[in-house]
Image (cartoon, rainbow, N blue to C red):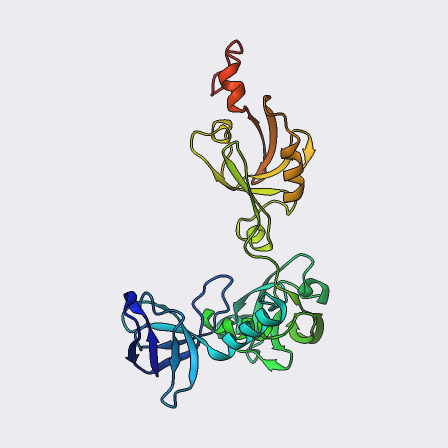
Amino acid sequence: VIAIGNPYGLEGSVSLGIVSAKGRDLRTEQLLNDFIQTDAMIDHGSSGGPLINLKGEVIGINSRGQGRGIGFTIPIDTAKRVAGDLLDQGRIARGYLGVTLQPLPRDLARYWGEPGVHGVVVGSVAHDSPAEHAGLQVGDVITKFDGETLHAEKEEDLGQFQRLVAQRSAGRAVNIEIVRGGASKTLHASLTTQPKFVPDEQETQHGFTVEEVTESSFRGQRLPQREGVLVSYVESGSEADEAGMERGDLIVELEKSRVATLDEFRKALGGLPSDKPFLVRALRGDDTRFLLLSPRAVTRGDKSAGTSPSAR
């Protein structure tokens, strides 16, 4: 194969190599981990260039390098599907089931008394997801997905399942064959569109920024609930910092106004007086924190109050 790109700004650079592997899983969250690995040089600036075979056919779009002689390319079939989604719908619309998985190594299969079973093990089921509606449970072994047999004994093998789900369109009905407690059964799921991964944010004039809670942040940060807004940034020395607010706090109430969504936070924030302290109720793990924020105008103007920063 030949990789063409602009490494380090050197236009039209060409390197020659071989395909080392297909279907590489880089174990990067929220990526469709289905990369072609090549030793054709893909350096900084090469991404976006084509990887072509000796017939001149484009087989992939160069993505990233990882050390000398290790480059990764997006397969052309994946790139064409993405381009089609963007043209037809204006966004990437991959199928979504709503599970996390782990491989099923042989020793675990034998321990469960199923030495001949191959597949993937369900580690979690997302709330209100197609998987939950279909009846999938933690510990189920998925052996077939939409007629495709699954084999995953190592982490890098999990990409097969991810690709199969992502290649199906939202709304498609699929059959899922599982083994549960030694018995085989078939479940039926209707895929939906992948939920939002990059959350909307709201910056405030009080030194902190919040974002909406996504399925990814709910799981990844082990939040106590889905309702609320997540503090994503606290400026050092700000009103929020002095009040004791921390990144990762889940704000659920703003001056007696319930906050379940980012829109509710914005509405409550807009109704606050600009010259009075206001109370924030937040969850930090299993603990509730009451944080009193004093706008700078109050701190500077009310010299008779004698309130120290530590008291606030």
Residue visible at 68% across and 30% down? 256
Residue visible at 71% across and 67% down? 134
Q: Residue furthest bottom?
A: 55
Residue visible at 50% across and 72% down? 159
Residue 273, located in which quarter of the rendered image?
top right
Residue 252, located in which quarter of the rendered image?
top right
Q: Work out whether residue 179 or residue 204 is closer to the camera in this orientation and state it.
A: 204
Measured from the top left, where is residue 195 in percent x and y? Answer: 62, 59
Q: Work out whether residue 179 or residue 86 is closer to the camera in this orientation and state it.
A: 86
Q: Work out whether residue 161 or residue 234 is closer to the camera in this orientation and state it.
A: 234
40 w.r.t. 216: above or below = below
Q: Is residue 262 visible?
A: yes
Measured from the top left, where is residue 1 in percent x and y? Answer: 35, 84
Residue visible at 69% across and 33% down? 257
Measured from the top left, where is residue 271 in percent x and y? Answer: 66, 31
Q: Is residue 113 visible?
A: no
* Residue 77 relative to residue 14: left or right: right
Q: Residue furthest front?
A: 11
Q: Work out whether residue 311 or residue 58 is closer to the camera in this orientation and state it.
A: 58
Measured from the top left, where is residue 279 in percent x and y? Answer: 61, 27
Q: How many marks?
A: 0
